[in-house]
Image (cartoon, rainbow, N blue to C red):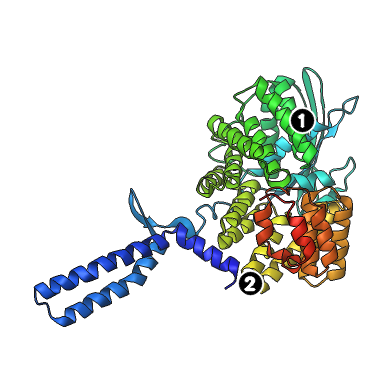
């Protein structure tokens, strides 16, 4: 058993109160045995009774530990302990290869000044998100769909790459009072038109229009609406909604600067409409992402907690509110609250990728690696083109000493990485994580080329540089590993001195004199 396996076992024993039960049982035994011995002597009990008592005490110890592992005592009585399994893991329907599927491409901007791209993309994303939540319908992710959605896409190619049977494309133009939208639903097998429609509505009716479009697309795909219906979206002034969509467009880019722009826009939305719960949830995302990936400051953590708390208060019916609260709770190391929030998010929206993915990350932080594996697996099934949730499983299997399983998921992960790079060759995260996968598969030359490309493309990205240090350390290239580590900023997301001290990927360079000198610059 390696260190990580031992740590996970210890965390499980504590979480299920096995350690506490063991201590209580031992203390009770130390009291019961001498007292019973005195009573036996006073009442002249036969000697064999003492042997029976000792046997019962010793035999009862493992039984008590097994019961402590399986059950817990609550105010409602004894119930099976859910800590060892995932309550919501079966709430998402299995993916059916022959079932209905669709990709929503970014809508084309038909404005004269071509300055409404953010609105057109945001409007398309809202339609995509509404369709994504419908049971028995598979919807390609925003990332992949928007990457392939050029002005003149090859629909057969889109269908092949995204594994969907239909594509929704469109265009829109917004004026101060009117919204013009043109949509087509196209069959990807032969390029034929399944359905088309043009709309011209007052801008104030944008929420009704979104619902009407969703209903029309579902009817054309022959898919039933959810029953019972979802809670309706909160309606806000169109100008506020325009700001919100602009913020979503920035946040979707996931860069440090765009994250800051998105935050400013969401703050403007809240200044105008303080009770817009969805804006509070997305604002909380910007702080949570900053803390995890860019800058792990106390301010970002405090703001993530404050804004997500407000989101849950104002919009408890939104999965996004609970996901943002789960992220903040995990970063605050309040893992019980994080678990409750993620479970609630999944209950509301079983197809919410962020809920499954960040729930899994929380379990990694907590040291529950087996449970994290199950959650990452669910995330990978919810978003079938995501490579991160698969490759992170490979890392966990490696840490648990299950090398055969690690290789199995690595092969699946690298297939997904290649599919992403086929769509977007400049995806640095794919190159960076894919390099580790290739190294694990013994393809060192290609792995090094991918890692070098990601480092060259992002010289100021501290996460990429840190991953480079880990990669070259594992590959045995000490000089390049130390160079990458030196190029990291003072903080890499929420990686600090403590993380550096325990990251096994760096073991090959840990005893080098340069390592100690570099690490001194990282925070305690």
Q: Which residue is mark 1?
A: 246
Q: Identify the image quadrant of the N terminus.
A: bottom right
Residue reaching furthest top?
A: 177
Tell me, yes or no, if residue 23 can be seen here. Answer: yes
How many marks the image carries: the answer is 2
Measured Cα–Cα span from mark 1 to mark 2: 45 Å
Q: Residues within 10 Å of mark 1 (few under 14, many from 20)?
A: many
Q: Which mark is residue 402?
A: 2
Question: If you read the primary sequence from the N terminus, does the residue marked by circle 1 or circle 2 appear first?
Answer: 1
Visible in this render: residue 415? no
**In x, y percent, where is residue 389?**
68, 56
Left or right, 316 with respect to 399, comes to: left
Quarter of the image for residue 364 reads bottom right
Q: Quadrant of residue 6?
A: bottom right
The percent position of residue 459, horizontal first and vertical second, equals 86, 50
Report crowding for label 2: few under 14, some 14 to 19, many 20 or more residues within 10 A (C-alpha): few
Which element is circle 1 on?
Answer: helix
Residue in the image at 87% along x and 29% along y: 110
Residue 210 at x, y percent in the picture: 69, 31
Q: Nearer the viewer, mark 1 or mark 2?
A: 2
Foreground of the two, 341 or 33: 33
Mark 2 secondary-structure assignment: loop
Along the line of sight, which residue is nearer the eye, 228 or 89? 89
Residue 250: x percent and y percent?
Answer: 77, 36
Q: Residue at x 22, y 75 (%)?
A: 53
Q: Residue at position x 23%, y 71% from top?
A: 33
Circle number at residue 401: none
């Amino acid at each position: 058993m390696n260190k990580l396996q031992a740590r996970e076992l210890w965390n499980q024993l504590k979480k299920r109160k096995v350690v506490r039960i063991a201590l209580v049982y031992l203390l009770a035994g130390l009291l019961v045995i001498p007292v019973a011995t005195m009573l036996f002597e006073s009442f002249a009990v036969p000697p064999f009774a003492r042997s029976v008592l000792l046997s019962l005490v010793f035999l009862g110890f493992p039984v008590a530990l097994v019961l402590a592992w399986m059950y817990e005592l609550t105010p409602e009585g004894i119930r099976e302990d859910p800590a060892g399994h995932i309550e919501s893991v079966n709430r998402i329907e299995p993916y059916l290869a022959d079932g209905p599927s669709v990709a929503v491409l970014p809508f084309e901007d038909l404005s004269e000044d071509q300055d409404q791209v953010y609105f057109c993309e945001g409007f398309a994303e809202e339609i995509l998100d509404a369709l994504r939540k419908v049971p028995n319908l598979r919807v390609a992710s925003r990332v992949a769909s928007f990457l392939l959605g050029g002005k003149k896409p090859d629909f057969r190619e889109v269908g092949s790459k995204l594994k969907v049977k239909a594509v929704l494309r469109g265009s829109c133009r917004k004026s101060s009072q009117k919204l013009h939208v043109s949509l087509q639903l196209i069959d990807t097998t032969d390029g034929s038109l399944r359905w088309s429609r043009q709309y011209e509505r007052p801008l104030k009716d944008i929420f009704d229009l979104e619902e009407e479009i969703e209903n029309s697309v579902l009817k054309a795909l022959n898919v039933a609406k959810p029953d019972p219906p979802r809670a309706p979206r909160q309606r806000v002034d169109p100008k506020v909604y325009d700001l919100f969509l602009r913020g979503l467009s920035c946040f979707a880019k996931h860069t440090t600067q765009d994250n800051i722009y998105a935050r400013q826009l969401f703050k403007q939305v809240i200044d105008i409409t303080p009770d817009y719960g969805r804006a509070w949830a997305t604002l909380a995302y910007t702080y949570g992402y900053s803390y995890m990936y860019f800058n792990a400051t106390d301010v970002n953590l405090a703001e993530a907690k404050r804004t997500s708390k407000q989101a849950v208060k104002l919009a408890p019916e939104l999965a996004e509110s609970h996901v943002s609260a789960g992220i903040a709770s995990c970063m605050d190391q309040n893992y019980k609250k994080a678990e409750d929030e993620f479970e609630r998010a999944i209950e509301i929206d079983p197809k919410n990728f962020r809920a499954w993915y960040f729930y899994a990350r929380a379990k990694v932080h907590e040291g529950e690696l087996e449970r994290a594996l199950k959650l990452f697996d669910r995330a990978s099934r919810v978003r079938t083109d995501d490579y991160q949730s698969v490759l992170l499983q490979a890392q966990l299997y490696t840490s648990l000493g299950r090398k055969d399983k690690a290789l199995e998921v690595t092969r699946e992960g690298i297939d997904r990485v290649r599919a992403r790079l086929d769509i977007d060759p400049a995806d640095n995260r794919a190159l960076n994580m894919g390099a580790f996968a290739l190294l694990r598969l013994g393809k060192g030359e290609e792995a090094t080329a991918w890692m070098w490309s990601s480092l060259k493309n992002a010289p100021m990205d501290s996460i990429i540089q840190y991953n480079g240090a880990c990669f070259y350390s594992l590959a045995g290239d000490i000089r390049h590993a130390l160079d990458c580590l030196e190029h990291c900023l003072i903080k890499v997301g929420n990686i600090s001195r403590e993380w550096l001290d325990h990251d096994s990927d760096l073991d090959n360079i840990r005893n080098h004199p340069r390592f100690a000198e570099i690490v001194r610059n990282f925070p305690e």
